[in-house]
Image (spheres, rainbow, N blue to C red):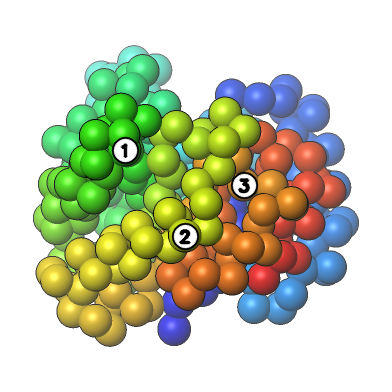
Amino acid sequence: MRKQIVAGNWKMNTTVEEGVQLAKDVLAKSAEVGNGVKLITGVPFTHLYPVSQIIGSSNIGLAAQNCADEPKGAFTGEVSVAMLKSVGTQYCILGHSERREYYTETSEKLVKKMALALEAGISPIFCVGERLDQREAGEHFNVVKAQIEEVLFTLSAEQMANVIVAYEPVWAIGTGKTATAEQAQEIHAFIRKTIASKFGSKIADDTTILYGGSCKPSNAKELFACPDIDGGLIGGASLKADDFIAIAKSF
Ligand code: PEP
């Protein structure tokens, strides 16, 4: 059965001290969240270890926001999946549109990162989504299908069972514009159908598909009520413990 998940993506925000305080605030309020709902905090590399010490064995999972596309070696500035694993990382956001746009994160690189993460026992939170011009041109289904085919279709069924998918329309990220519940449900159902076409309906039904893009306490309820939306990947609103927890209480 698929899980209900609310994952925060702190991006490049907070100092370690501020991040530790935010993690403490989220932990303190996490008991308010329904039993079946999993919380994940996606923190900067520098915060992984200190935040892991705060969240311990609670219901809060620990996510990195990227990993290297090589296992080890002379790759200055990169962070490997083994390093992530060694500080308790359980999830890794991969294919976020900001990385695709600013850091040449191609499908080719993502195939390598996904395989390395899964091999290390880290579950990828794999992001897909179209830009505004692509949606306006009616290309959004094709764009998302290609992103899925180029990366997820390289996985085995066993690997796919450990992947979380996030649909994040680029035009809704950090813009205050949210996809309507109808727009989001339509493409989430399409994503599930696309996954089913390769991996079968059992794996597709069990795949958690998150919505991301200006999700906040005021719109989370309507989005999470949709049959194919299993939670959210939350950027801006994850930086305030009250808002993050309010979103997680919106199922
Ligand atoms: C994100 O970047 O993953 C995101 C969903 O950001 P925001 O919630 O700020 O739109």
Q: Earlier in the sequence, mark 3 or mark 2?
A: 2
Q: Which residue is mark 2?
A: 182
The amino acid marked with disc number 1 is Arg
Q: Is residue 45 left or right of residue 50?
A: left
Identify the disc placed on residue 215.
3
Give the quarter of the figure containing the N terminus: bottom left
Q: Amino acid at mark 2?
A: Glu
Q: Report helix, strand or loop for mark 1.
A: helix
Q: Is mark 3 within 8 Å of ligand 1?
A: yes
Q: Could you classify mark 1 by the number of other residues whose Cα lies within 10 Å: few (under 14), some (14-19), or many (20 or more)?
A: some
Near mark 2 (Cα within 10 A), the count class, few <14, some 14-19 or many ≥20, is: few
- Give how far across and how far down residue 128 sits, in percent: 33, 45
Q: Residue at x 69, y 47 (%)?
A: 216
Res. 2 image quadrant: bottom left
Q: Quadrant of residue 208?
A: bottom left
Amino acid type at image mark 3: Cys
Task: State which tag comes first along the sequence, 3 or 1.
Answer: 1
Q: Residue 224: horizontal and vertical position, in percent?
A: 59, 65
> What number is the disc on residue 58?
none
